[in-house]
Amino acid sequence: MNNSDSRINPRQLGTPRGGSYAAVPTSGDRKNRNKLTRGRKKSIFEAYMSKEDVSAGLKRGELIQGPLRINPKKYHEAFIPSPDGTRDIFIDGVVARNRALNGDIVVVKLLPKEQWKVIKPDGSDKETEATHESDVPEDMLGTCVPQETAKGDAKSPDVIIEAQFDDNDAEHGQDHLQDTLADDIKKLSLDTGEKVKAVGICGVHRTMQDDGPKVNDPRLLPDKFLQRTAKVVYILEKKHSRAATGFIKLLADKNSELFRRCAMFSPVDHRVPRAYVSLADCPPDFVTRPEDYSNMLFICRIADWKEDSNFATGQLAKSLGQAGEIEPETEGILTEYGVDFSDFSPEALECLPQSLPWVISPGEMAKRRDLRKECIFTIDPSTAKDLDDALSCKQLPDGNFEVGVHIADVSYFVLEETALDKVASERATSVYLVQKVIPMLPKLLCEELCSLNPMRDRLTFSVMWKVTPEGKILDEWFGRTVICSCVKLSYDHAQSMIESPGKVFSPEELPPVSPQHSIAEIQQAVLNLHRIAQHLRKQRFIDGALRLDQLKLSFTLDQESGMPQGCYIYQYRDSNKLVEEFMLLANMAVAHQIYRSFPEQALLRRHPPPQTKLLKDLMEFCNQVGLDIDFSSAGTLHKSLNETFGADKYSEARKEVLTNMFSRPMQMALYFCTGVLEDETLFRHYALNVPFYTHFTSPIRRYADVIVHRLLSASLGASSPIKMEKEAIQRQADHCNDRKMASKRVQELSADLFFAIFVRECGPLESEAMVMGVLNEAFDVLVLKFGVQKRIYCNALPLLGFHFQKVGRKPELTLVWEPEKPEQESVPQVITIFTLVEVMLTSDGIPLKYSALLKRPSSE
C-alpha cells in the first residue's frame, strides 16, 4: 500500500531552523507543570532531588542515569541512551530537561505510561533517537589531515576530521535511518488515530493512510509502538563546559528595573539557554550604541539557572571579535569545548631539561639498545612537526625481516606526579585545528626533544619483530632504545617509492638523507614494509576487521591571510596504510604485554559492538531499499560494503553513502582500566575484531599512551611500577575519553568553519550529490566533491508541488518543477535513496551558514 502524502509548496513557511530558546513548555511539560505551581511563586523547573534519594533510587532501579544528548536541530528534544540498548529514552521539552546541558550525566525518572511517545509502526517517526554528533570510532575510519597535521593524523587510524556536520542544523542524524519520516508538525501529537488531511497537488484532497494503531491512549498500546519518556531529576556531573559563544542584546522592556542592570546573551548554539549578563561586563558604549555590537561574538559562562527563571544568569568572559572570522570563531569553539589553549605554566616548564642543547647522558645510553646505526626513518604528513613514530626493516640472512616500530620515549621526560604530568593529564590530547595545533606538551618536547627529527639522537621505546616475507610473526622484542632517524619522509615521498619501485630517486627529489644510508637502502626498506603491510592488512580483513572510510576534507590556506584558498578530499593511500598496519601491530603487541604483566592496572582500548536498536533500524532500512547486507559481524559488514555496488563510476559514491549509514549505529571506542571491568569479553575491539588493543604509538599527542609507556616500562623491569591504583587509572581513562570526544568535535567544527568560509569566499560551488535519506518534505544529500552532508528542503525550491510516497517500503519524493517558460511542461523529478542530483552550495548571508540548492533537472 502506498503511504502517500502530497502537498502544495508552502513557500511562506521558509526553511525550518531552530530559534534560540526560552523555556517554552511543550505538551509533555504542561502536564507536569500544573501540579507544581499552585499557590506560590511559580517555579518553571522542578527542584533537584537530594543526593541520598538519587543514590537510593538508582540502586532500586527507579531512576536511570546516562549522558544527555540534545538534538541540535530541535533543541526541545533530548535523549538519554536506554541502559538495555533499546530505543533511547525521550526527554520532551526544556522543562523536562530541567536545566541540564548537552553532554551532562543526568539522572531521570520515567514518566507514567500515558505520557510515553507513540511511534509509527513503520518507523516513520524520525526523531525517535537523538541526532548523534558523529560517533564513529576512529579506529575503523580512514583518517584525514588537517593543515597543521598531527603526526599520525593521516596514519594512525585515529585522528580524523569527518565529513562536515553543521551543528545548529546537524544535517545528519538517525533521522535518516528510518527515512520514511512522519511530519514534524504531527510529531508530538499522541493521537495517531487521527487522519491528517493534506492538500494534494492541484488541490485534490487525500488522506494520509495510517497503518498505525487507531488508539489515543499509549497505555493500550504494546511497548513496541512506544518510546519511554522521562524528566531530569538530578545532574550527576556537569560535563558541558558551561561556556558558550553568542551575541548580546538590550532587553526588550526599556522601563523595567532589569533593563538598567542587565543585557541578554543569546548563544549561537540553541541548546544552551539565553542568559542575563551584567551591563557592567558589557562594553562601555553598548547601551548607547547597541547596533555596533550586533555582529560581535562574546564568550559567556553560565553561572546559575534558577528554578523560577526562563533564563540563566551568566558572566561575560570576553569579546572575541566579529562573527564569521577565523580567529574569533576558533577561540569560541575551543572555549565552548573546554580546550585549554593557555600557555604552559612556569611550574610545568621547569620540569623540562634546562641546559640546552640537550644530550643523552652516557648513563642513560648504557641502559638502552643502541640502534643509531640502523636505517630508521619517519613517514608523516609533510606539515607534521611532532614525529612520534619511526620504522625500520632489515632483511636477515635467512630471508626473513627484522621490522621495528620506534616510538618517542615521552615518559622519560614526563615523570609521574610532576607539574608537567598534571597539565598533560588534564589536556589529555593535542587538538588539531585546520590552521594550528593546540599541543598536549610544551613545544620543546613535542617539536624538539621527543620529536624523532632526522639526524638527531633520540630516546625511543621500540617493538621489534622477526617476520616472514608474508607477515607471519616469528619473534617479538620490547625495549628502550636510542635511534637516529636517517630521513623525514612525507606520505607523498613514500607513495612515489611504492608506485615506482624501479625508479632511482635523486637527492633533490627527497628531503636531506643521512650520509650513513643510501637512498636505495631507504627505498628498499619502504618497499619491503609495504609488501609485509599488504599481507598483514589482507589477513586482518580475512580475520574479520571492519573499516569505514568516510570522506575527509583538507584545505590549502593562503600563506599571508590564512584564509582557505582551496579544499579537496584527502586521499588515503598505500603509504598511509603501510604506517597504519605497523602501528596497529605495535598497539596490539603492547596491549597483550601490559595486560599479561598487570591484569589489574592495564589501560586498554575497547570498542563495544553497534547499538542494537540502531542496527536493527539500519537492517530494516537496507531491506526496504533492497540492499543485501550481512550485519552478523564486523567482518561480514566489511565484506558487504566492499563488494562494490555496481561497476559504474558512481559505485564509489554509493559506497560513501552506505559507509555513512553504517557509521550511525557504531559506538565510540573507549579507554578503560582492566581491573575495573570484570568480564574479559567486554575488552574486545569490535572494528578491529581483536581481544586486546591499546594506544602506544602517539605519546606526544595522547596522554593514554604515556600511561601505557609507563606500564610497558614497568613490565620490562626498566622502571618501578606505576603509582596509580586501578580506580585512578579508570578516572584518567574516563577523562581521556571525554577529551578525545571533545577534540574530535572541535576538529570537525574547525573544518566546518573553514568550509563555510570557503563557500562564502569562493562560492557558489557546484557538485554532484547523492541522496542518502528521503523525508516527506526534504531529503539529505552527500555532496560528492566535498564530502559534506546537507539537507535540501522542498519548500526552498521553485516547485509547483511535491509528493511523498512509499513504493513498497522505499521512501520516494516526486518533485514537480515550475516550467522555465510558460509554454513548457512542468518537469517531474523522482528523489529516492542513491539518486544522483546536481547541487549548488551558496552562502546564506548569515555568518558561516550555507545552503545546498538543487539544480533544476534538464527538461529532456
Image: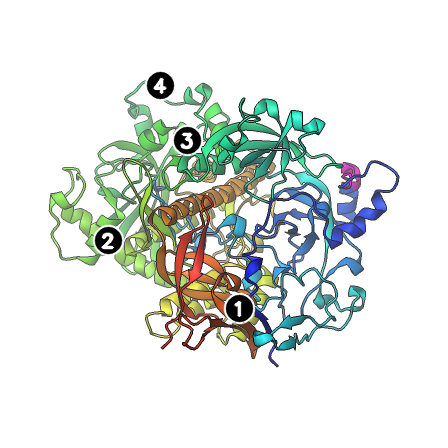
> Where on the picture, by quarter, is residue 695?
top left
Point out the residue furthest to the right here: 39
Mark with earlier residue (3, 1): 3
Mark with earlier residue (3, 2): 3
Judging by the rendered image, the residue that carries numbered circle 4 is 354
Evaluate whether residue 667 shows in this view. yes
- Dot 3 surroundings within 10 Å: few (below 14), some, or many (20 or more)? many
Mark with earlier residue (1, 2): 2
Apparent side of residue 231 relative to residue 496 in the rendered image (left or right): right
What residue is at 49 percent from the left and 54 percent from the top? 136
- Between the C-alphas of marks 1 and 2, the distance is 35 Å
Mark with earlier residue (4, 3): 4
- Dot 3 amino acid type: Leu
Return the residue nearer the eye: 198 or 253.
253
Apparent side of residue 120 relative to residue 414 in the rendered image (left or right): right
- Is 89 magenta? The answer is no
Pick the quarter of the image with the N terminus: bottom right
Judging by the rendered image, the residue that carries numbered circle 2 is 495
Span of residues in magenta: 45-53
- Dot 4 amino acid type: Gln
Q: Secondary structure at mark 4?
A: loop
Judging by the rendered image, the residue that carries numbered circle 3 is 441
Q: Are marks 3 and 1 in contact (CB under 8 Å)?
A: no
Return the residue nearer the eye: 94 or 577.
94
Q: Residue 457: x, y in percent?
A: 26, 31
- Dot 4 surroundings within 10 Å: few (below 14), some, or many (20 or more)? few
